[in-house]
Image (cartoon, rainbow, N blue to C red):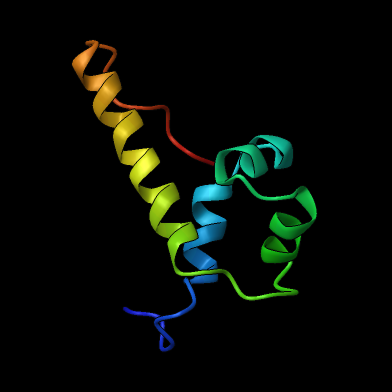
Amino acid sequence: MRYPNLRYGNPAEFTFYALGVPLPVLARRLRRDERTVRDWLWCRSRVPWWVPELLRLQHLEAELRHRHMGLGALPARG
């Protein structure tokens, strides 16, 4: 399902990919201030469209890297 306004990302998808990642690490990966990322997580401000996309691509790349190294799949989330 697409988020209705294409300028903004899906907050649920952002929360899914941010699960288990410490706030300073997430802010560094997104190259944004911790306060900005915290506002996105707490739904104080809207998430830009590129944030969930970038996290999704980073996650897919990490899975592919694990597979190429013969380590199997990434550990389950949650």
The x and y percentages for residue 48 are 53, 69
The x and y percentages for residue 39 are 75, 64
Q: Is residue 26 above or below residue 6?
A: above
Which residue is at a point 30% across and 34% down the rendered structure image?
Answer: 61
**In the displayed structure image, the side of residue 33 where residue 55 appears, left or right:** left
**In the displayed structure image, the side of residue 43 where residue 74 appears, left or right:** left
Quadrant for the C terminus, please: top right
| Quarter where residue 42 is shown | bottom right
Which residue is at a point 70% across and 72% down the rendered structure image?
Answer: 43
**In the displayed structure image, the side of residue 54 where residue 19 appears, left or right:** right
Which residue is at a point 76% across and 48% down the rendered structure image?
Answer: 34
Q: How many marks?
A: 0
Farthest residue in the top direction? 70
Quadrant for the N terminus, please: bottom left
**In the displayed structure image, the side of residue 26 where residue 56 appears, left or right:** left
Which residue is at a point 30% across and 30% down the rendered structure image?
Answer: 63
Farthest residue in the right direction? 35
The x and y percentages for residue 12 are 52, 67
| Nearer to the camera, 8 or 59 | 8
Farthest residue in the bottom direction? 4
The x and y percentages for residue 18 are 57, 48
